[in-house]
Amino acid sequence: MKNLLALALLLLVCATWGCKRDIVGPLENNTNPPGQVSNVTVENLAGKAKVTYTLPKDQDLLYIKAVYEIRTGVEREVKSSYYTNNMELDGFADTEEHEVKIYAYNRSEVASKPVSVTVKPLENPIWGIYRSMKILPEFAGVRITADNPQQANVALEIVRKDSLGKWEPFLPFIYTSQAQISQTTRGLDTLDQEFGVTVRDNFLNYTDTIFSTIRPYYEVMLSKSLFKELHLDGDAKIQTVTAGMKLMWDGNNSNFGPRMLTDIVDPNPQYITIDMGQAAKLSRIKIWNYSEFMSNGQHQFYYRGQLRFFEVWGSLTANPDWSTWTKLGNFENIKPSGAAYGTTTTEDWNAAIAGFDYNMDPNAGKVKYLRIKCLQNWMGSTWFEILELNVYGDTR
């Protein structure tokens, strides 16, 4: 038995050693360079260029590689498989001519002689964003707006001058690909403050910096301890067993907690009324959407009964007659990526987690009661759900 066991072990060692010897060395060993690409054409685009070519006919062709400088001293490589005959060369900061060397590689990683072409990219989108950018005062904060029609992935890096006159980063920076950029950072005092903003792309290309001095508008968050349930004639039926009104101001905005939910059956525009327990000239309302739990164990925003198109109304009296109410705003819950229904990007997710701010009509007077009217939820119906809300304004 011992001899049989020893023999089995010996055979196992030999087999293992033999297998290892079989895989040592390259799978291909063709030292002959492949042919070059040919018939190269160039299409200059915004901040990049598209090159199209004819592939060499080598049977062991593996990929095509372009090598070029995006700016002085900074080299970039772009690869494309042999399944396609074009590639995009991105990352250019300027509109100058750039030499590009294109190589063909075989499966032995042997390169062909390069083919040189010249590209002259159009203006990088960061410059159009820069020219349209504005630094604006906001309620208890600062708002940065800009146009990004090409939906380029950019970062807007913000600096603020501190009390000693030193510039320091003002976080969080804005990372976005939205066509219409508009983002607010709050928590600021109502004093003159100096800001600067520059635009950066994914290749560390920077614009110049714009500067502005702004004074944030005054506001406070209304005390939710004074909020009360109110049901006027015509108001939506609330599923009070598991999703009552009070859940909108219980302080739980974790996106996975209990929420207010209206009756799903009613097809008409639905609305609810809130007694804020205090009169104020409102500046904005912040709403956290409920995160729908999916069958795959994930959570989904911009989905089903989450508010999409809605109105906010205010009044000093608790009267069901709409003629006694003032419209404070007509709003849309916007998905930053613009992706299809049921698809949520990281940018979409982060925006939903942070909650959505909706600014009120600055010309409206004080109100004590709020009405939220759903015109359409994300699935195209009118029932709606709200996880949490904050209301801001001036109670003075």
Image: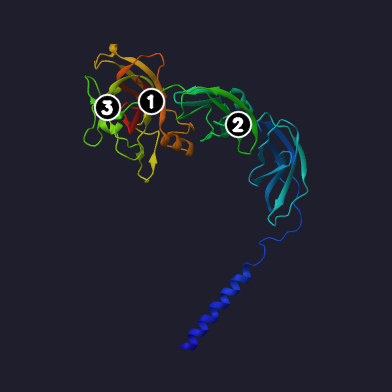
Q: Which of 214 and 10 is in front in this view?
A: 214
* N-terminal label among 1 and 3: 1
Secondary structure of the residue carrying tag 3 is helix
The CA distance from mark 3 to mark 2 is: 43 Å
Residue 47 in sight from this viewpoint? yes
**In the rendered structure, are the residues bearing label 1 and label 2 in contact, judged by CB atoms less than 8 Å apart?**
no
Q: What residue type is labelled 1?
A: Val
Secondary structure of the residue carrying tag 2 is strand
Q: Mark 3 points at which residue?
A: 226
Label placed on residue 199: 2
Q: Which of 301 and 156 is in front in this view?
A: 156
Q: Position of residue 343 (x, y in %)?
A: 44, 37
Horizontally, is 89 left or right of 230 in the view? right
* N-terminal label among 1 and 2: 2
Q: In terms of image quadrants, where is residue 71?
A: top right
**Residue at point 41%, 16% (across, down):** 362
Residue 343 in sight from this viewpoint? no
Q: Position of residue 151 (x, y in %)?
A: 56, 30
Q: Where is residue 163 in the image (x, y as percent from the top left)?
A: 54, 30
Q: What residue type is labelled 3?
A: Leu
The CA distance from mark 1 to mark 3 is: 14 Å
Q: Which of 396 and 366 is in front in this view?
A: 396
- Number of other residues with Cα within 10 Å of mark 3, as a class: few under 14, some 14 to 19, many 20 or more: few
Whether residue 7 is situated above or below residue 95 in the rendered picture: below
Label placed on residue 220: 1
Q: In terms of image quadrants, where is residue 293?
A: top left
